[in-house]
Amino acid sequence: MILLIFIAAQNFHHLELVKKVPVDAGPKSIYYSPDGKYIIANCLYGYHLNIIDHDEMKVIRRVPAGGEPVECDFTQNGRYIWFSLYDKDMICVYDYELDSIIKKINVGEKPKIIKVSPDEKWVYVSNWGSASVSVIDVALLSVIKEIDVGRKPRGIAFTPDGKFAYIANMGESSLSKIDVKNGHKKIKYLPAGLTPRHLVVTKNGAYLYQTNNLEEVVRKLDLMKDRYVGIADVGKRARSCVLSWSEKYLFVCNYMDNEIGVVDTDKMVQIYSVKTGDDGNGHPIGITISNGGEYLWVSNYRGGVNIYRIIWGGT
């Protein structure tokens, strides 16, 4: 607890490269398990999930995906890994303890992001090819509804209370707001700037941050008013992002610049950047942060996984 309070009070200084971990081809995304014990790299062109041990910082298990894995999320504190297969129009549920895929669920066309609701009752899947979101009942392990949203939906973020979900419609520059508690109904359409891609929400549900890929900015949305209150210029082709543990900073994959940018979320300005590689082994696309916020893990589409220690300065 003392360490977490200390980190939260610190100002960001720089990222220190600790290790590079080789993984299978095309690591499209990367996620920490809820218990912080392992990290999943979804290797699109390697057709495997690579499971990396947090302490050993090396691949300890390669899970055949049966297709092109894009994104994932977790239930039951990381025992079950839900991952999307882009080329199969399918979601798979992998049991970490049994080391086995226990369920395959058909969804819409070309599924991308998959997000579990805070109460773990629902799994939302953005279907890039069919302009819809599939709603999966976790208890039933089946789709109970398809929600029509905008073209090329990608990012999904639930509010912490689980009442609402926001969908980034990358193909028509909008967000769709879904009422989760009342029949998964689409209740609002928000103009969101050019090509909104990735969405993250603060722990208290006050703000949503989004990357705008072609516009090369990050936007800040006030969730009480559903109104944008800030915008920050970042690098070329901003992709995925993740908040620091204190939420004072946002780490952004500036894909075409081969760098990670760091945005001050109060001032809404990029204050730092570091190269992750070059055109041959870079292109950062996935990003995740350790429990407590000590380490930042970045997957490079043309390379492996970079592990950084987050170095803090004065208060």
Image (tube, rainbow, N blue to C red):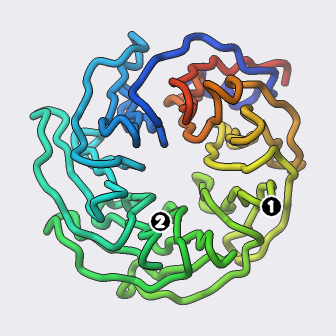
Residue occupied by mark 2: 161
Q: Quadrant of residue 103?
A: bottom left
Q: Nearer the viewer, residue 210 or 172?
A: 172
Residue occupied by mark 1: 215
Question: Does 20 sit left or right of 257 as displayed?
Answer: left
Tag 2: residue type? Answer: Asp
Q: Residue at x 57, y 37 (%)?
A: 287
Q: Residue at x 22, y 36 (%)?
A: 64
Q: Nearer the viewer, residue 43 or 51?
A: 43
Q: Which mark is residue 251?
A: none
Q: Are marks 2 and 1 in contact (CB under 8 Å)?
A: no
Above or below, 277 against 247 in this view is: above
- Between circles 2 and 1, the one closer to the viewer is 1
**Callout 2 crowding tier (Cα within 10 Å): few <14, some 14–19, many ≥20:** few
Question: Does 194 sit left or right of 144 as displayed?
Answer: right
Q: Residue at x 54, y 32 (%)?
A: 299
Q: Residue at x 12, y 39 (%)?
A: 100
Above or below, 262 against 296 in this view is: below
Q: Position of residue 107 (x, y in %)?
A: 28, 70
Above or below, 239 against 16 in this view is: below
Q: Quadrant of residue 250?
A: top right
The quarter of the image holding the N terminus is: top right
Q: Position of residue 225 (x, y in %)?
A: 73, 78
Above or below, 7 against 138 in this view is: above
Q: Quadrant of residue 284?
A: top right
One can see residue 3 in this view: yes
Q: Mark 1: which secondary structure?
A: loop
Q: Mark 2: which secondary structure?
A: loop
Tag 1: residue type? Answer: Glu
One can see residue 2 in this view: no
